[in-house]
Structure formats: structure tokens, C-alpha cells
Image (spheres, grey):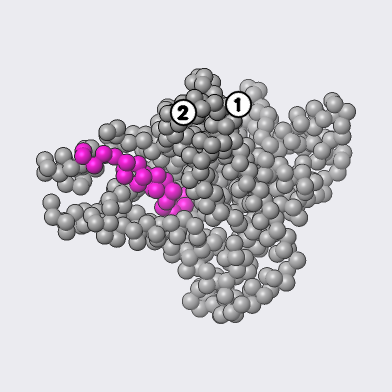
């Protein structure tokens, strides 16, 4: 087939992904101009008066700014360090264990938390570390005083950082274990013959061999230097710990979408448990019509998002996996994707764009509003690049075109990466609560996680008394809320075993063996 005809086919493959990228990822960046306006929703961006740097000058005069910038930086830096050191250390230790069953079991146990939502995990943390929770009960039993994890800023910040590392280190461990599979066993054998012990082999062979992966993960994590984790903090914090945990994202949300200070919020944004297993609780859930309505909304959203994501990413990834000589604009498109992965217009421009698209109170809107999943697409591109070129060359000799090669040869041998991307998409959309919270003006349109977030009782620890803390169990139906959280986790726990066998191989980006 002629080169020009191939180019046309590759353009057709990549155009849907580009449209999604432009409409959801790039267009909201235009809303950055609100940071330089006295924005009025009635007048819109084009007719609101310009004020230059006044919003930034006003922002720097606010006493909260230094606090939120400091909190964001401190929490983000400690998360970056912890999520780099802990996974590397755990991967190195796990790599030294020869018992295969123990290794597989340990891997499974440590990366399961990655697939659970912060709504569910926050509910558990609130119960475990609460005033009458197991942690404080143990401390009291040992003769120590209770600790107010949700009133003391220092303790709360430590809980935020520690729980994030606990949730994510297992997933990152898999990446380093994948890199360790590329280390030649002959190096270890030669070192052992020379008298090197395990510690020496780890220092002089294992660590240098995965140095490139460690540096890559560190560089990628630096893009999150001002991303301290909105979902986690928003679900856990309260006014009592604002001084230690209020970050840029939570402040922008309150200022922009709660207090309606669009321009100021755009300026700041630019700068950027114990489960109740009683039968009664589950009977109560069965009577909750809104719970099941939200459940159906979440399932519909997940199905739509998975179908759309795979349908758009598969052909686009195949085209972008081709070298520049076969698909000329390949590098330019990749740089645009990477730019959009590292930079966005911020919460307020994104919200205004979604509103203008008519995606408020829309399940389709919830499925696409996150934009093109660029990280997943890069994984898929790398997998397609690893497939043996001889297979495609043989198909071309037989007269097959790009589409036939994609569907007849590439996809049948791509089950690991397809299952991995499907799992990532299902988990991210099932666990996501904030987009549903913002884009749904009525509770009837809430997906499940947004509904649970709305229904689980939120306590203002800054004004609660010691007597109220002691009787906290009487202030809210904790067991019922815990039951709702548990039910929300069941779909992920149910599908995980079926996709688990593909997960590690998909992350490792294995290809056809020569």
C-alpha cells in the first residue's frame, strides 16, 4: 500500500482522540483568561472587563495564600518522597524472596488499595482513627491519652501523607518489579561466584539496573509538585485542620464553586473502617431508592467510559505507535498529549467549559469529562511498539491494510494491555466522585461515590465538644454508612480477580517473543 494511503488511514485512526483531547483537555485552557478579568457569568469571557493582574495582587494579600501554598508544597513533597522510597524498597525486598506463592500473594495484597476510592477509604479512616475508633481504643488500653487525628493539624497531615503512601505504594511496586525482570540472572550468578552477598548484589547490580526506571518515575512525579491530592483531602479534612491541610485545589473549589469567586479562584488555580456487617444495615440499603439510582448511574457511566476510551484509544495508539517515517505528525501529537497531561486550565475553566457543552446532569458528560486518558494511551502505545514487526510485515505481504492488521493481528495478542486499560478505566470512573459532585446539580444524577460522599455524615471537629466526641456514635448512623461504603466497593472487588492475571503482564508491557 502506498505511503500516502497509509497516512490517510492513520489520520482517521487518530482524529477521534485528537477531537476528545481538544474539546475536553485543551479548550478549557482558554478559560485561564478569567484570571485576568472581573469575570461575570452573565457576560461571559468575551464581555467581562479586564483587570490585568489585580486578581493576583489581591490573592497575594490574602492571609490564606501563604498557608495553602505551604501546605500544598509540604504535603506534595512528602508524598513524592514516600511514594518513591517505599515502593523501591518493597520491590527490592520482594525481589529477594524466592517463594513464588508468597510473592504473588504479597503483590496482590499491597496493590488492591490502589483500586479503591478515596470516598470508601476515607470512611474507613474516619472510623479507624476517630475518637472512639480502634486506634484510640488501643492507645487507651495501653494507658495513653486519646489522639485527635482530625483536630490536630500535625497528626492530620501525617495521616494524609501516610495513608496516601499506603494506598499507592503497591501499584508503584509493580512497576519496579517489572523493571527487575529485565535484570539478567547471569549477573547475579557471576557476583555470587565472586563472593558477593545479597546486600552487595542489591547495591551493585539490582539498584543500578533499575536506575533508569527510578529516575523516570521521579521525573513524572515532579509534575505533581503542586498536586497534594484533592480527592483524599477533600474527603477527610474539616475546618479544624484547614491551617495544616488546606491546599490549592480545595481552596479553589471553595472560592470558585462555593463562594462563586470565579476570577480569584482561576488566578489561584493557574498558580498551581470498620464495616457494619449487620443484616439490618443492608436491609436499610435495600430500601434506599436513591442509592440504587446512583448505583445504576455509576454502572452506566463506567460502561460508557470504558467503551468510549477503548474505542478511541485503540486505533489512535496503533497509529501513534508507528515511527515518524510512516506517520509524519506522530511526534508533534505525542508532545501535545504530554503537555496536556502535565498542564490544565484549572477547575473553574474546566467547569465553565463543561457547562457550555451542556454536560451538566448528563451520564455521557460524566463518561467523557475527564478528557482523553493520556497515561493509558501511552501504555498502549508502548505495548503496540513492542509487538514483533515481522507479523505486520507478513500481513502486508498478504495484502492487509492498517485496519485489518489492527483487528486481525494486533488486538488478538494485546489482551494483557487491553485488560489493564479496561481495569484502569473501570476503577477510575467507578471511584471518581468529584466530577459527579460538580457536574450534577441534583442528587438524582449523582453517581454512587458522589452520593455516598453526600450522605455520609460530615462532622465539623473545630466546634465539637469533648462530650460530643465521647458520644460520637450516637450522632450518626456509622454502621449504615459503613455498609453503604462496603457495597460501593463490591463491584471493584468482584471484577478484580478476573482481570488480575492480565494486570502485571500489561504493566510490564510484554510483547510477542522472538
In terms of secondary structure, where does tag 1 sit?
Answer: helix
Circle 1 residue: 283
Q: Residue 414, located in which quarter of the rendered image?
A: top left
Residue at 52% across, 48% down? 215
Q: Is residue 463 visible?
A: yes
Q: Residue 368: horizontal and vertical position, in percent? A: 43, 51
Q: Position of residue 112 (x, y in %)?
A: 54, 32
Q: Work out whether mark 1 precedes mark 2 in sequence or the reverse, and give the earlier one.
A: 2
Residue 188 spot, x, y in % from top left: 48, 29
Above or below 318: residue 109: above
Residue 160 sits in quarter: top right
Residue positioned most to the left: 398
In-image side of 193 versus 165 (left or right) = left
Discs 1, 2 touching: Cβ within 8 Å? no
Report which residue position mark 2 lands on: 190
Q: Which residues are magenta?
A: 364-391
Query: Is residue 289 shown above or below 438?
Result: above
Secondary structure mainly formed by the magenta segment: helix
The residue at 87%/32% (across/down) is 144
Q: Quick one: 346 or 457, which is closer to the camera? A: 346
Residue sitting at x 47%, y 52%: 370
Classify 10 Å Cα crowding around label 1: few (below 14), some (14-19), many (20 and above): few
Q: Does the magenta run of residues contain 373?
A: yes
Q: CA distance from mark 1 to mark 2?
A: 63 Å
| Residue that appears at 85% across and 29% down | 140
Amino acid at each position: 500500500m502506498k505511503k500516502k494511503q497509509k497516512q490517510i488511514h492513520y489520520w482517521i485512526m487518530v482524529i477521534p482522540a485528537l477531537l476528545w483531547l481538544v474539546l475536553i483537555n485543551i479548550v478549557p485552557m482558554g478559560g485561564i483568561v478569567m484570571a485576568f478579568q472581573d469575570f461575570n457569568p452573565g457576560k461571559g469571557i468575551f464581555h467581562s472587563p479586564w483587570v490585568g493582574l489585580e486578581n493576583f495582587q489581591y490573592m497575594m494579600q490574602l492571609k490564606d495564600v501563604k498557608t495553602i501554598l505551604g501546605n500544598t508544597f509540604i504535603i506534595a513533597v512528602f508524598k513524592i518522597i514516600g511514594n518513591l522510597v517505599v515502593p523501591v524498597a518493597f520491590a527490592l525486598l520482594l525481589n529477594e524472596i524466592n517463594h513464588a506463592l508468597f510473592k504473588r500473594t504479597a503483590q496482590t495484597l499491597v496493590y488492591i488499595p490502589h483500586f479503591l476510592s478515596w470516598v470508601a477509604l476515607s470512611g474507613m479512616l474516619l472510623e479507624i482513627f476517630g475518637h472512639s475508633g480502634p486506634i484510640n481504643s488501643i492507645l487507651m488500653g495501653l494507658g495513653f491519652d486519646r489522639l485527635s487525628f482530625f483536630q490536630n493539624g500535625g497528626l492530620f497531615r501525617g495521616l494524609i501523607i501516610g495513608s496516601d503512601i499506603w494506598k499507592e505504594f503497591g501499584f508503584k511496586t509493580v512497576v519496579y518489579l517489572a523493571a527487575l525482570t529485565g535484570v539478567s540472572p547471569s549477573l547475579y550468578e557471576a557476583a555470587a561466584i565472586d563472593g558477593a552477598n545479597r546486600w552487595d548484589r542489591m547495591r551493585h547490580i539490582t539498584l543500578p539496573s533499575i536506575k533508569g526506571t527510578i529516575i523516570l518515575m521521579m521525573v513524572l512525579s515532579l509534575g505533581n509538585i503542586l498536586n497534594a491530592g484533592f480527592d483524599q483531602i477533600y474527603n477527610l479534612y474539616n475546618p479544624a485542620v484547614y491551617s495544616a491541610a488546606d491546599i490549592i485545589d480545595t481552596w479553589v473549589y471553595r472560592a470558585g464553586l462555593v463562594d462563586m469567586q470565579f476570577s480569584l479562584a482561576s488566578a489561584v488555580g493557574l498558580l498551581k473502617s470498620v464495616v457494619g456487617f449487620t443484616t439490618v444495615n443492608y436491609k436499610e440499603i435495600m430500601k434506599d431508592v436513591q442509592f440504587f439510582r446512583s448505583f445504576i448511574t455509576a454502572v452506566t457511566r463506567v460502561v460508557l467510559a470504558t467503551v468510549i476510551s477503548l474505542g478511541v484509544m485503540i486505533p489512535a495508539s496503533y497509529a501513534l505507535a508507528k515511527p515518524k517515517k510512516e506517520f509524519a505528525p506522530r511526534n508533534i501529537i505525542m508532545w501535545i498529549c504530554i503537555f496536556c497531561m502535565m498542564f490544565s486550565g484549572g477547575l473553574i475553566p474546566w467547569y465553565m467549559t463543561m457547562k457550555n457543552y451542556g454536560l451538566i446532569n448528563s451520564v455521557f458528560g460524566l463518561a467523557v469529562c475527564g478528557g482523553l486518558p493520556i497515561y493509558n494511551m501511552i501504555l498502549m502505545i508502548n505495548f503496540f511498539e513492542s509487538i514483533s514487526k515481522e507479523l505486520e510485515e507478513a500481513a502486508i505481504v498478504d495484502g492487509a491494510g492498517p485496519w485489518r492488521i489492527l483487528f486481525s493481528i494486533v488486538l488478538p495478542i494485546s489482551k494483557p494491555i487491553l485488560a489493564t486499560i479496561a481495569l484502569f478505566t473501570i476503577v477510575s470512573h467507578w471511584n471518581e466522585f468529584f466530577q459527579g459532585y460538580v457536574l450534577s446539580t441534583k442528587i438524582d444524577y449523582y453517581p454512587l461515590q458522589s452520593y455516598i460522599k453526600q450522605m455520609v455524615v460530615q462532622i465539623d471537629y473545630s466546634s465539637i465538644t469533648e462530650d460530643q466526641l465521647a458520644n460520637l456514635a450516637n450522632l450518626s448512623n456509622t454502621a449504615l454508612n459503613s455498609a453503604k461504603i462496603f457495597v460501593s466497593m463490591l463491584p471493584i472487588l468482584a471484577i478484580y480477580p478476573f482481570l488480575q492475571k492480565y494486570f502485571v503482564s500489561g504493566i510490564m508491557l510484554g510483547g510477542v517473543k522472538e
